[in-house]
Image (cartoon, helix red, strand yellow):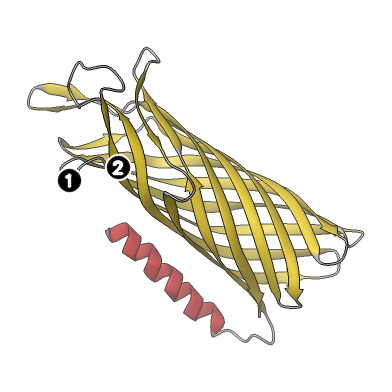
Amino acid sequence: MKNRKTFLYLYIFFIFTVTNISAKENTFISSISFVGMSMDYREYNLNGEILDSEESSYLDMSGLEMTLGYIVSKNISSSSEVKFDFMILSGETKYIGSYLGSSLPYGSVISTTKNTIIDTDISYRRSNRFNNNLELYYGIGLGYREWERALSASQVEVYSWYSIRPVIGISARIKEKFNLGISLEYQYGLDTKMRSSNPRLDFTLGGADIFEVSVPLSYKYKDNIELFFEATLQKQIIIESDVKYAGGDGYYEPESTANNSYLKVGAVYRF
């Protein structure tokens, strides 16, 4: 909860700071979108056998994404931009697994998990334009991701890590008002952790990596307003943690994979 409030305050502070800079000399870009997320998450034991899973549809997990960008420089053939992005999602997933510490097989327990996901980053992006219809861009960002997974009132797990995020993409103008693009992003996790409430333990994850492909489509509604739709496919890999002990028993966070997809619908405003 503390991390969520901190990043929300940073986002608000960033907005007030940049909007007080002279708009006559600089250009700003802001956007807001509604987001639906489909999750397919699976945990595996040391033999590669599935332990439990979480699944959701786009309507089960939803939320908002807000961005604010500042164009550092711009000319006919290129531009550079600094951007702050904040996304928050919440909802329920279908849990399939077994009781912790039991010898029962996968599928012996089916329940509902309450989730909250926060993803935020600050990034720099450079764009190069060709023939005024094709744009190539690349950049790098520093991000933070947190997933609160409440399997029950007494069993809450919180995954969190920072990440370095290089990205490359291309977009093309279609006719006069449409733009279609594709981008590739890799997120390399740093300071990867998982905190468990029952038993109360803090684990150090072996790693957390995300591979992401996005396909945005935008429509120029006015000179300073665009409407957009974006589809994103995401592959998340978490490596098993170290072993912690409580009450004489050893615990660890197992290896997991997640195939997540996002649908975003929103608007961009330039000022």
Residue corresponding to mark 1: 153
Relative to 252, say whether 105 is above or below: above
Q: Helix or strand or loop: what does disc 2 sit on?
A: strand
State the residue position of label 2: 113
Report the number of numbered marks.
Answer: 2
Marks 1/2 in contact by CB < 8 Å: the verdict is no
User: Where the C terminus falls, by quadrant?
Assistant: bottom right
Quote the CA–CA distance across marks 1 and 2: 10 Å
Residue shown at the point (22%, 17%) measured from the top left: 104
Image location (x, y in percent) of residue 2 = 27, 60
**Residue 55 to residue 140: above or below:** above
Residue located at (34% from left, 48% from top): 115
Name the image quarter holding residue 156: top left
The answer to whether residue 249 is above or below residue 264 is above
In the rendered structure, which amino acid carries the disc numbered 2? Thr
Quarter holding the N terminus?
bottom left
